Each structure stands twice: as structure tokens, then as C-alpha cells.
Amino acid sequence: MASEELKNLLNPCAGGELGDIVKRARKMGELTHILCDGLPDEYVGSIVAANLREDGDLVVIAASSAWASRLRYETDALLDAARKAGLSPGACRIRVTQS
């Protein structure tokens, strides 16, 4: 596959076939950053990814089960951070990465 074809495939602005996936990944990355900023500094690196589902659930993926346990105490802070960013989460679910 030529490099120009690959570039178009991944380009979300050009209607590339994988453009929606690229857009979604960026949004998830931005949300993860927003949530991390809403937590105390000691939580840096505790969140691997985050997503706001269509049903309103804010899903946070924790780096480990220990971090998941700690993050469950911070669900109000996570919801507040998402709301300050203009989102409307209804509930917060903490999950552990499958690594």
C-alpha cells in the first residue's frame, strides 16, 4: 500500500475509512486527560483510558486493581471534572485494564 493511500485511510478529515476510529481515540484521550486533571497529583498514571457511553455512563479504565479501588472513592471528583468539561455523565464505572 502506498504511503499516500495509508495517509488517506487514516485521515479523519478526508473521510478516511478509519477516520471515525481516529476521532474517537482522540476524544477518549482528551477525556482521559480532563479526568486526570480533576484528581490529586498522586493519581497521575492511574487512569489508562476513559469513555462516555451513549447511555451516559462514564467508564474509567484503571491501571491496576489497586488503582481501581482508590478511584472508586473519587467517582464524585471524576463526574465533576467531566461535567466541568461540558459533558453529562449519569454514573461512573471503574474497570481494570486487561493487561
Image (spheres, grey):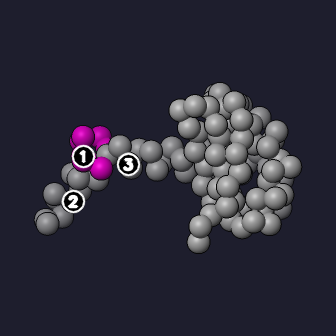
State the count of labels: 3
Horizontal side, residue 8 vs residue 82: left or right: left
Q: Along the line of sight, which residue is nearer the eye, 72 or 14? A: 72
Which amino acid is tagged 3? Ile
Query: Is 17 contained in the magenta span?
Result: yes
Residue identifier under label 1: 16
**From which residue to which does the magenta span run?**
11-18
> Looking at the image, is mark 2 or mark 1 earlier in the sequence?
2
Q: Who's the residue at 29% across and 40% down the image? A: 13
User: Which residue, as the protein is rendered here, is positioned at the far right?
Assistant: 73
Would residue 59 be counted in the magenta stretch?
Answer: no
| Contact between labelled residues 3 and 1, with CB atoms less than 8 Å apart | no
Give percent across and percent down for residue 10: 28, 53
Q: Main secondary structure of the magenta part?
A: loop
- Eyeballing the image, is 64 above or below 84? below
Which quadrant would residue 24 be assigned to in this image? top left
For residue 91, above or below residue 63? above
Marks 2 & 1, CB-CB < 8 Å contact: no
Q: Earlier in the sequence, mark 3 or mark 2?
A: 2
Pair 1/3: label in front:
3
| Rendered residue at 65%/40% (across/down) | 58
Q: Is residue 2 left or right of residue 77?
A: left
Determine which residue is flagged by label 2: 6
Residue for badge 3: 21
